[in-house]
Amino acid sequence: MTRRPALRTGGLSEGLMIPIWISREGPIPIREQIATQLILGVMSRDLAPGERLPSIRALARKLSIHPNTVSTIYQDLESRGWLENRRGSGVYVRAVPAFKRAADELLARYISAARAEGLGPGEIRAAVEHALSTNRPTCILVVDPDPDLREIMEAEIRLAGLQVRSSATATDCDGAIVAVIPARERLLDSLPAGTESVVLRLSSVAKSLRGQTRPSSETIMAVASRSAVLRERCRSVLIAAGVAEDALTIVNSGHEGWQDRVLAADLQIADLVTAGRLPKSPKVRTFRVLAESSIDDLAAAVAKG
């Protein structure tokens, strides 16, 4: 019989507005479990830009882990650009993306040059508003180097009735709103001036698990996707939430015979593209990559055109 690992729940502590699950008996290190959930919290905006995280000691006490573990996690996420350590104040979700700083600097240079040419505030404002109102994009360009993840995000956006295409780079972005996930914000740094861009929010893991009935320890679950990123993140979160590793079947839906492995499971979790290739069944749970609110924002941005 499958033995369920011990489950410890934290969260809602000193500003941390997401639950943190950790499994002490699973194969994934506790540091990786917590880091993954914090990253997903930032990407889904459950942890808002500028939000203060619990102190190292507070989070360590809440989760009953060593403070050095929390310190290592915070330092790692800071070096990867997810968090920022404000000396004497604490650790915060990174507030201003690099591409926004670059846009602000570009706009400041334009205003300075326009003033040097003798343009007044009204003329500068009119020029900016004219530039923003002309040639409004009607298509969305999803940019990501992972072709499998691009296909899934493109399918989710198209399902909402929006015109969308995808690319590994943003070089061909004419007439499109460029959309990236938070982990790919640096791809926006090289966009031509005036290109409209959107940082997509990911589906909230905490919200998707809220109200769900915990599967029994005998339940075999299959996670299926062509995206290695999605497979690993689902595995990490499920194990942290208390699902035993030997109750999980992780399936690459790009491999031959993958359907047989998935259909043999009691519960099947798949991305939108993969779910569409499975027989319709109440056993199939579709995992959405993008938050519904983020797709609504895309629709609103296109509608302005």
Image (cartoon, grey):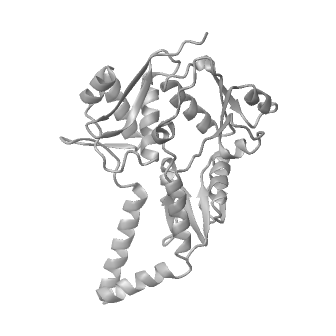
Q: Is residue 297 left or right of residue 146?
A: left
Measuring from the top left, give residue 264's x and y in whole percent. 75, 25
Measuring from the top left, give residue 303's x and y in whole percent. 55, 73
View extreme (top): residue: 1
Q: Viewer-proximal residue, 108 or 294?
A: 294
Measuring from the top left, give residue 257's x and y in whole percent. 81, 30
The quarter holding residue 60 reads top left
Q: Is residue 146 left or right of residue 46?
A: right
- Would residue 210 be seen by someone viewing this image from the given angle? yes
Question: Which residue corresponds to the image point at 43% horizontal and 42% vertical from the top-left?
Answer: 41
View extreme (right): residue: 257
Measuring from the top left, give residue 278's x and y in whole percent. 76, 39
Question: Which residue corresponds to the image point at 36% horizontal and 40% vertical from the top-left?
Answer: 78
Position of the N terminus by quadrant:
top right
Q: Viewer-proximal residue, 284 or 159?
A: 284
> Where 164 sits versus 7, above or below?
below
Q: Is residue 295 left or right of residue 96?
A: right
- Would residue 190 be seen by someone viewing this image from the given angle? no
> Where 283 sits versus 151, above or below?
above
Question: Which residue corresponds to the image point at 48% horizontal and 44% vertical from the top-left?
Answer: 204
> Where 58 sits versus 204, above or below?
above
